[in-house]
Image (cartoon, coloured by chain):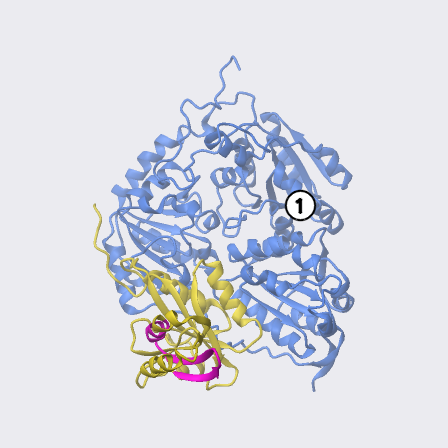
Chain colours: A yellow, B blue
Amino acid sequence: MGPHKRRAGVWGGAPYRKKMKHTFVVHVEDKPGVLNRVASLFRRRAFNIESLTVGHTETADVSRMTIVVDTDANGARRLEANLYKLVNVLRVTDLTGQAAVIRDLTLIRVAASHQTRTHVMQLVGTFRARVVDVAPESLVIEATGTEEKVDGLLAVLRPFGVLEMVRTGRVAMARGQQSVATEATGGAPTDAPDDTVSHSV
Amino acid sequence: MAEIRTGAQILWESLVREGVSTVFGYPGGAILPAYDAMLEYPIRHVLVRHEQGATHMADGYARASGEVGVAVATSGPGATNMVTGIATAMLDSSPIVCITGQVGSKVIGSDAFQETDVTGVTLPITKHNYLVTDVADVAPTLHEAFYVARSGRPGPVLVDITKDAQQSSGEFVWDPSPVELPGYRPKLRASEAEYQQAIDLINGAKRPIIFAGHGVMLSGAMDLVRELAERANIPIAMTLLGIGSFPALHPLNLGMMGMHGEAWVNQAIQEADLLLAFGMRFDDRVTGNTKTYAPNARKIHIDIDPAEFNKNVIVDVALAGDLSHVLRDLLPRIERGDRSGWLATIADVKGDSAVRDVQNIPDTGHLYAAHVINDIWRLTDGRAVVVTDVGQHQMWEAQYYHHQEPRSLITSGGLGTMGFALPAAIGAKLARPDAEVWVIVGDGGFQMTMCELATIAQEKIKINVAIINNGYLGMVRQWQEFFYERRYAATPLLSPDFVKLVDAFGLRSARVSRRPDVVPTIEMARAEPGTVVIDFKVEQEDTVYPMVPAGADLHSMIRRPSPSPIVETADD
């Protein structure tokens, strides 16, 4: 018997080896050491974190992480399964390929002399960014948007001299009615099979 | 009315309510309040000689009984000494709870005497861990810890309790109701579509093999696996930790697969058209080169841990869930099968391999480990609990001791921890006092934890120890022989006189270097009321065959040489 065609199951199926950026939204219990557990998992399983943000949510005691990882489809699935094994992880959503609002907040200190300031401010306006601080030889610009938009802004500012920059990394939320948050925190645990709740083992 | 107790008392109140009667530990400053309170409770404390031993004992206790094993240590070095044992339990999914003392909560972070960030150190090698700084958290945390350790895919859980949390008093409230954690619900069910795919593959397979892993025993699915195998006539191959889950002498049992699996097993895997992997994880020691692994086989993987799916080997159908539940759902839909052609094909290869087996070689006066282990098997009727260390003897044990019972082979498979056997056997014996317990250990591994002989003497424990003494770190020497041009770097091993050493501990010992002495000495050890350690001086440069070199194709194994270099002629 020679090589055969594989049937796709929920877990089985053809290995999808193409790497791409995966965006995970991870709801976790707001307890000491949880960030360490999540970060340690990525390190231990040899996944590279591109960015990780963490902050409060609409629910007390629940934090939300947005984690961007460069991996293939199989890696993303294993990562999700491994995240669920952490006792403090409540829900994992892979937003990759879903309609989602994705934002990155950036602060950029750019050199702007008396001669160049107006030009810089015009560019900032074009990108719908804002000047939030003005000094004699520089400006601080705040930009919010997709990473591509911020990258575009950076490209045009570089010739003036980018003196300092900080980016938050991606935060994300699915578009439309669907809410990952309610599923993560609401409802009593049941024995019924339910793909929407944590299934640590 | 809630009663007022110290945190230390609440610790023991909780352990007793979790069904704990035996703990393995070593006292020290930060755990002293707990030790003081222990005297008030019905707990047997086994004083170990090194905290690593305590974790291996708890592990052996858990593997022999299926119950959670408990190890106790103080902060700092006491806790860090546990690391190897915790990692061992982690890789073999063994449920243990480790309780460590921690410095007072006010001085955490100040590099206080014997302070170590133990929850940080053990984070990647525990299933979960806790730092308890408040007396009110002691009871609920322990209840949760035992639940996490034993449920789902079992594993080690560490609870680090500060000294002030042990000393201060609070209300003791025991809530025996099942633990419900918002982020931990180890109850999975596969979908009907996945079940149907599995059924179709199984009923349609012509050359299927079942893989029985540790999960078969952890799930208690031995009878269900047997029912499936017998109904559908599917042969079973076992992982090292799966040994015992299916009777070794059952005609459908092929034996151990993988790096030191017999040729007929590995060859059958390469020719199979369906693998049914039950509670195993396609470890690299099992698969060899995954690119050429079982190239013609569809694969069904049943495991309680979805993170194992498609980790090492891509499978066609993966059923997440407790193996017993899944098999109960599958069994009614499995058709009876006649696979005599397939079984006959395997039997043909088996016949060819068996003639080269060392047991079929006439006695030439030399003592081989395989002889010793095979004789222990014969004399114990395959019913002993055998605890092995790591290395050549471990593989020979897997090949020549034919286990008929579940939980009768206890060995460090995933981590391969030398020094495991002696302490784990102490734990196993205390879990099953009526069992005949044998340790099979190399001269290297024995010296790593032989201090626990003192524990055996103090606790008056009866086990039998067979040291397979070849004067080398044998498995490493074997790799050097095969892959490093026989450059024996740091593998020749000088050992103390084990007979004198054991005598110094007040235990009985014997030395055997001729084959005729093997059986009488084993019989003497079995009859002796106390622990007996036998130093078997075996052939020094013996080799475990067959062998699939690391990363090589499973079918390209180094076979037993024929004629074998270990067959001597009259001129030897």
Which residue shows up at 63% across the image and 70% down it? B131
Residue B320 appears in the figure: no
Could you tell whether B118 is left or right of B42 in the image?
left
Farthest top residue in view: B571
> At x 35% / y 40%, what residue is drawn?
B553
Q: Does residue A101 lie above or below B118 as drawn?
A: below
Q: Position of residue B380 (x, y in %)?
A: 56, 41
**Is residue B24 left or right of B572 when viewed as pictured?**
right
The reply, left or right, for residue B134 in relation to residue A28 is right
> In this rendering, is residue B46 above or below A28?
above
Write down the region rendered in magenta. A130-154
Asked if residue A147 is among those painted magenta in the image, a careful observer would answer yes
Quarter that holds the N terminus of chain B: bottom right
Q: Is residue B465 magenta?
A: no
Residue beneath the point at 46% across and 86% down: A58
Q: Which of the 4 image quadrants contains residue B512? A: top right
**B299 or B358: which is nearer to us?**
B299
Residue wearing tag 1 = B449
Q: Secondary structure at mark 1?
A: helix
Tell me which amino acid carries mark 1: Thr
